[in-house]
Image (spheres, rainbow, N blue to C red):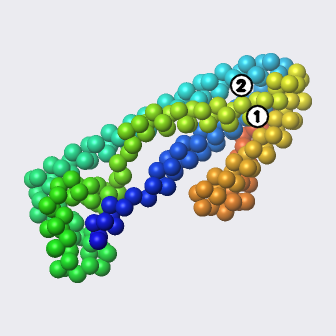
Amino acid sequence: MLLLLYMHHEHHLQSSDIIRDIVIGMSDGLTVPFALAAGLSGAVNSSHIVITAGIAEIVAGSIAMGLGGFLAGRTEVDHYASELKREYAEVEKVPEQEKMEVKEVFAAFGLSAKLQHEVAEEMAKDKDKWVDFMMRYELGLEEPKANRATQSAITIGLSYIVGGIIPLSPYFFIADSLQALYYSCGITMICLFIFGYFKSKVTGQPKIKGALKVLFIGAIAAAAAFLMAKLITG
């Protein structure tokens, strides 16, 4: 019964990786290009220049963010493989010590010493399940999906592009960059609030507070970039 409990997988948690990647990509995608566009709008009056610089930043940013996600995913896979190899070596070389660690896990659940011993002995009959148990409950590691790194890179990169296009979109239709900035602020502020709201909802945080926090961060970044550009250009 206990073995069945620990082997049960919460399938909905796997999708949290995708949600996390979307949050990472969208968060930076909405904020960084928005701040860049605001800063340039304070220095030049041509939307064409803002669009050119904005697209260049979105391309570079999405690649950098995607690569970062890929490397993080590869590191997770490599770390799991390294720990898995070590656990297999330990159950071969020091099985009694590993059994003691199994007992410690179940002792924390309040099982009697007799049951701890029985479970540990039963588990030791199947090394694969034994090692899997130790990976989960001793080290707190879940096996990452094989394509996790690539999937993370694509998700983060695309999310960054989608987020980055939003604050840049008014500049495609309005030639004067300062006027376009007004529309960009309105659109982006709404999107930041909505994004913050759903981000907080998914992560279980206070929704309105989370939405306002994301909105505030984006507004501060854009305002700082705009004022800095104005100070430099006089």
Q: Which mark is residue 54?
A: 2
Residue at x 49% of width, y 30% of height = 67
- The residues tagged by marks 1 and 2 sit, at their Cα atoms, a distance apart of 9 Å
Classify mark 2: helix, strand or loop: helix
Q: Nearer the viewer, residue 55 or 13?
A: 13
The residue tagged 1 is 167
Q: In the shown orientation, is residue 31 left or right of residue 105?
A: right
Contact, mark 1 vs mark 2 (Cβ under 8 Å): yes
Q: Nearer the viewer, residue 3 or 109?
A: 3
Please state which amino acid type lies under the numbered disc 2.
Gly
Q: In the shown orientation, is residue 81 left or right of residue 161?
A: left
Residue at x 38% of width, y 45% of height = 144
Give the image location of residue 19, x and y in percent.
56, 47
Give the image location of residue 31, x and y in percent.
69, 39
Please state which amino acid type lies under the numbered disc 1.
Pro
Residue at x 15% of width, y 62% of height = 124
Can residue 42 be seen here? no
| Circle 1 Cα neighbour tier, 10 Å, few/some/many (<14 / 14–19 / ≥20) | many
Can residue 157 be seen here? yes
